Image: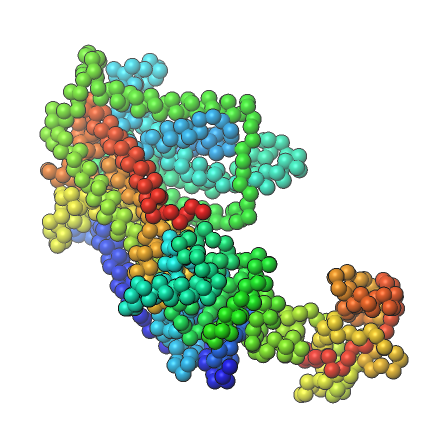
Amino acid sequence: MRTSLDRDAISQRAALLFAGAILLVILVLPLATLFEKSFQNRNGEFVGLANFVRYFGTPSLVASLWNTLWVSVLATCIVVPLAFVYAYAIRRTTMPGKHVFRALGLVPILAPSLLPAIALIYLFGNQGIARFMLMGESVYGPIGIVIAQVFFCFPHAFLILSTALAIADRRHYEAAEVLGAGRLRVFLTVTLPGVKYGIVSAFFVVFTMVATDFGIPKVIGGRFNVLSTDVYKQVIGQQNFEMGAVVGMVLLIPAVLAFVADRWVARRQVALLSARAVPFEPQKHPLRDWLLFGFCALIAGCILVVLGISIWASLITYWPYNLSLSMRNYAFANADASGWSSYFNSLTMSVLVATIGTTVIGFGAWLVDKTRGAEFLRGVVHLLAMIPLAVPGLVLGLAYIFFFNSPKNPLVFMYGTIGLLTLNTIAHFYTVAHLTTLQALKQLDPEFESVSASLKISVWRTAWQVTLPVTSPALLDVWFYMFVNAMTTVSAVVFLYGPFTKLASVSIINMDEAGFTAAAAAMGCTIIATSAAAKILHSLLAEWLARRTQAWRSR
Amino acid sequence: MSDSAYLVVDKVTKSFGQFQAVREASFTVRRGEFVCFLGPSGCGKTTLLRMIAGLETMTGGRIVQDGRDISWLPPSQRDFGIVFQSYALFPNLTVFDNVAYGLRGRGKTDAEIAKRVDELLTLVGLPGEAKKYPSQISGGQQQRVALARALAISPGLLLLDEPLSALDARVRVYLRHEIRELQRRLGVTTIMVTHDQEEALTMADRIAVMNAGQVEQFDSPAAVYAVPSTPFVADFVGTTNILRAKLASPGRIVSGGVEIEAATPPDLFPGADVRVCVRPEDVMVRGVNENTPNRVDVTVEELVFMGSFSRAKLAGPKGMSISADFSANLLRDHALATGARIKVALPADRLRVFPG
């Protein structure tokens, strides 16, 4: 015998199936096509591992693999310690200006990865103002890539480590002190073990970001090849789709490894801290505090310099001959045929991604969390929702070409449209949004739905009257996250835009390629300004929402 | 209180793979009765309650409520109100809207709803708090709101899942009484899950004592206390001495070399291992002499002051150890102190003998 289903259970199951179907179309089928393609020749015949054999037999391609590895390891080993000290200073000391440092540390998130690369060209390029600092080395190549990646990845590592350092039990520190442990010993035996999973997670996340990023090596890599630029060259340059698919598969490896490691870490991290923990309050220690203040000021200063150089470069009329300031570079039509339209395409797409994405992902997360029974279906949908975290944007973009550009696909009409760019970007950033919503839902009392059932009230009504209002701050966060990422993303969409749907980030690449570096910087600054404006709007909205729907939170 | 069976739980079982959370639980709850599920954490009492509500699917057995087989109905098609330990009040709705939640969308006018909510809030002793949010009232008040919300739709069965455990001791004792009064007045059949024996003993008409997924005894509080049907029940409800012994002959057992008269279970052969349960307050001290049956010579090893009485640890022959409660009076009259050698008796009618 089985429990008979009521109307709620049937409608929830139907909706869950629909959510699964969406994920199937925007994620699983494209990836499956990519997988299939890597085992086929140009004519679509199955050739087994022949493509892979050819790949590993091509010295230049294998060299890229090696390049990608060592550059990623180097950048990761620089970023994580820097971010750790920065986060430690903010979370565990009484240093002044913590809020300012925190905000400045996160600024690079608002910019596309291309922007630090462009700023580096102005600083250390062939006509750069600080070129002497490289002592004859060229910034085009691994040096430029590593420095730019450090900027680009810093806020991500900082966020992870800052969260890990935020939670601490004061009693552990008191116990260590009572037992006579010195500062170093306390740090090694209490602080580090408490955040080790955060550190591991930061290493993996940063490594994957560097290994799979496309924008930075494209702009500042020069003749130094990495996997992501190889994919682009094989597919866009040589129209060699099979080889592109193979490189895509290789690119999946670090991401999948990082994903597995991250899940492993997440499982171990639970319950490190009991509900009874006494929150840690940092004590004054002037020497340490001021040393760390100096360190943070240095890092924040570097970030400001990169940002400042970008803005300045975008305003200079003609570097380095005419240093007068003007808005000439913002007339994008001079540098790229699509002009300002690419910016408005980006804006349109970002609003669509954020709005549709938040709705669909939020709804999906609600179904995964709140459908009564249906464990299998819920598990499957949740698993599908986790996949995008393990798929680099470039690979997803490639998969979309194969899947949506096939004449056999009834959805082929979407190719090159804003609609497809939107779908792709939603799929690309699905996981974080899904997990954020799920976490917000988990904070609600799990018995709300049980109470509703006992009162004969539909779960849908409870979702509308209770769950949605209570989780609205988290949904607003998701909206903002999706918007900023859609504004700045390059890797997936670079394969998918059509003649009338070029995006701002893509036009940065095109303008930079065509030698209009100043215009590229100007477009980068426009994107930052938009993200920053969205951030301000987000704060204002969050406050308004708090007043409006969260009145119950105040005592 | 009528004697008709309202809820029949018949061999209800819940397994998770190999593990059986509830094993063939069977009992019948009468209409208007207040029943407690009592047991240690993990004994399956909450799982059983959730199966009655339909929030967990059972893997075997049958549940009949008011003549209707509800075993396989989803919760929305059953007839119950429920209060959780966390109360699960909707945080963004006022007290009024929480209580009114189940009343809306049933063709009632706003005025009718307002009147009913008013009635309910008065019933649970919270008039005038309607406009506040749950976070603005105390834990005890939240508990009453949850109760009012559950009662709003006049359910045939009220389920309470540890409703008092999140409250501090004083409020808890007060609300015990309140809930019981309310239940009597409304005559609603009620099942409450608790791990607190005092709560169960003071509130319930009947108690289902559960252990490791099984209902070990289903009886009135007095019977559960006085005539426990298993050593577990004897030990879990109140305090008890459990002495190892062997059956000498029907009606006679031997423990620590002492022969003891007691009602022994049938079907046991002489020489079989048995356990004898006796409560500390039933150990007799006054008027024990050479001729008192079931006499044991003991030494007072330890006296622990407990307020109105002291609990003594008594050492008998051959390592036998017995706890006994001595009133302050008795201690004074007999000038008892640690090391004293005294005679105590284990009254035959107070002994419970179990096989094993």
Direction from residue B97 to residue A284 in the image, left or right: right
Residue A422 in the image, given as x and y percentages of width and height: 20, 44
Q: Residue at x 87, y 71 (%)?
A: B342
**Along the viewing direction, whichever of A222 and B32 lies nearer the viewer:** B32
Res. A13 visible in picture: no
Q: Residue at x 27, y 23 (%)?
A: A310
Direction from residue A242 to residue A481 in the image, left or right: right
**Along the viewing direction, whichever of A1 and B103 lies nearer the viewer:** B103
**Along the viewing direction, whichever of B230 and A463 lies nearer the viewer:** A463
> Which of the 4 image quarters holds residue B303?
bottom right
**In the image, is residue B212 above or below residue A342?**
below
Q: Residue at x 37, y 75 (%)?
A: B72
Quadrant where the N terminus of chain A sits is bottom left
Coloring scheme used? rainbow
Residue B52 in the image, given as x and y percentages of width and height: 44, 73
Tag count in the figure? Answer: 0
Q: Residue at x 68, y 79 (%)?
A: B354
Res. B320 visible in picture: yes
**In the image, is residue A171 above or below residue B150?**
above
Residue A458 in the image, given as x and y percentages of width and height: 31, 64
Residue A378 in the image, given as x and y percentages of width and height: 34, 60
**In the image, is residue B247 above or below residue A162?**
below
> Which of the 4 image quarters holds residue A108?
top left
